[in-house]
Image: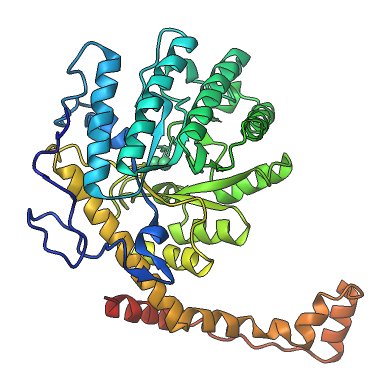
Amino acid sequence: MADFFTDVPGRIAVAGTDPGDGLGFRVYDPDRIVAGRRMEDQLRIAVCYWHSFNWPGSDIFGDGTFDRPWLGATDDPMAAAFAKQDAAFEFFQKLGTPFYCFHDVDMAPAGSTLEESRANLDVLVDRAQEKQELTGVRLLWGTANAFSHPRFAAGAATNPNPEMFAYAATQVRNALRATHRLGGENYVLWGGREGYETLLNTDMRQENDHLARFLELVADYKRSIGFTGMLLLEPKPQEPTKHQYDYDSATIHGFLDRYDLLDEYRVNIEVNHATLAGHSFHHEVAYALGNGLFGSIDANRGDPQNGWDTDQFPNSVEELSLGMYEIIRSGGFTTGGFNFDTKLRRQSMDRTDLFHGHIGGIDTLAQSLLVAEALIDDGVLDAGRTARYADWNGTLGRKIFEETTTLDSIADEATSTNLDPHPVSGRQEYLENEVNRVIWSTT
Ligand code: XLS
Ligand code: NI
Ligand code: NI
């Protein structure tokens, strides 16, 4: 199965070099220095196992359409997992990106018992370790899928049946251990069905207590095995459940604070989940950065006319540049990166389409990174914000925060000086034009 992607004979050409086979990056050049770091080290791109190598291109109305010979080519699930892993690493290497991500069941088939599942995962992890050493590809994060199997229909940690909690805990224990063995830089928990369909049968408060207990156990286990990577929660407002507990970054923030878990977890923000929550990507990133919660990104985009998680490849520099600007001006990623949690459209059935999707998405991120650097260097947004809040450094601004200040003292002074403040322009259109000026002139 080696050399499955036969239309792509070697590594994809980076920007500035001749793409002999016609497939090349137009902007992404790993060694180009942007905002003080190599582009590769700023973006820390990862390819995801699940959408790219597990999913056959099926939807709720139809079967798989993709040319993926490792899916179903053999009745032996372990042989199929080996073939899939070969294809995945061939793809990572040809694309030339530094990281990948996986769920336990993406990498290894579930067995008929928990013990068999763990043993299967161990075999595939050994194999992954060899391939990582051979190719230099590293693990951005691992995770456990505790949402697909029918046993998790009513949730994993929030399932009314404690046996499901224990089952999910076993999966997470094994996946976290695998992530640690593979040198993963983070471990992600996406609460796929941690939410509810109807309050007629749901005790929300109790389910939240169970989720917090789960997260506490995971954090303790992480420390007990010496895993120094970051634990990340991935917000999503709904889908598959009607209402998910990890709605958005602010909801997760409140939850972690309430259960005294703020030191243990950060967030993995997905672009399409931000928009499903009624926010922009920019908002979610700025909230997480501003509250010490920022961890990593699942790069993708939604469809503005659809109300679900279409997980398309990112292609809008406008959409990504402002989020990128916040990330880079705050010092960039530490353990996080941009994971392509992205799906091809069902009609993109050629094996080479997987390259086109990733190349376009990576170039979009690379161009957004250049825009972010240019926005920082230009200074127009920082200068505008600084000027807008400047009065808080003045006499009144400072006095409001003095300990002796009371509501009465503020009101008395305002009344006696006959305070009559005048509003000033927020200059939104001016700033939008300035951002476009920078976007349009960045090369
Ligand atoms: C689904 C999520 C999922 C997580 C990993 O919407 O994005 O893919 O990233 O479980
Ligand atoms: Ni995701
Ligand atoms: Ni998603």
* Along the line of sight, the residue nearer the viewer: 286 or 104: 104
Q: Is residue 359 above or below residue 137?
A: below
Residue found at x 59% / y 52%: 293
Q: Quarter of the image containing the N terminus?
A: top left
Furthest toward the top, the residue is 112
Q: Position of residue 242 (x, y in %)?
A: 48, 33
Answer with the quarter of the image where residue 256 lies: top right
Q: Is residue 357 above or below residue 104?
A: below
* Along the line of sight, the residue nearer the viewer: 318 or 427: 318
Q: Is residue 34 left or right of residue 146?
A: left
Where's ligand 3: which quadrant? top left
Residue found at x 53% / y 28%: 177
Q: Quarter of the image containing the C terminus?
A: bottom left
Q: Is residue 290 above or below residue 206?
A: below
Residue found at x 36% / y 38%: 133
Q: How is the image coloured?
A: rainbow
Q: Is residue 38 left or right of residue 388?
A: left
Q: Is residue 442 above or below residue 361?
A: below
Q: Position of residue 314 (x, y in %)?
A: 30, 54
Q: Position of residue 162 (x, y in %)?
A: 62, 15
Viewer can see residue 12? yes
Q: Is residue 210 left or right of residue 35?
A: right
Answer with the quarter of the image where residue 43 lies: bottom left
* Along the line of sight, the residue nearer the viewer: 158 or 304: 158
Q: Position of residue 137 (x, y in %)?
A: 34, 43
* Along the line of sight, the residue nearer the viewer: 441 or 108: 108
Residue found at x 59% / y 25%: 157
Viewer can see residue 196? no
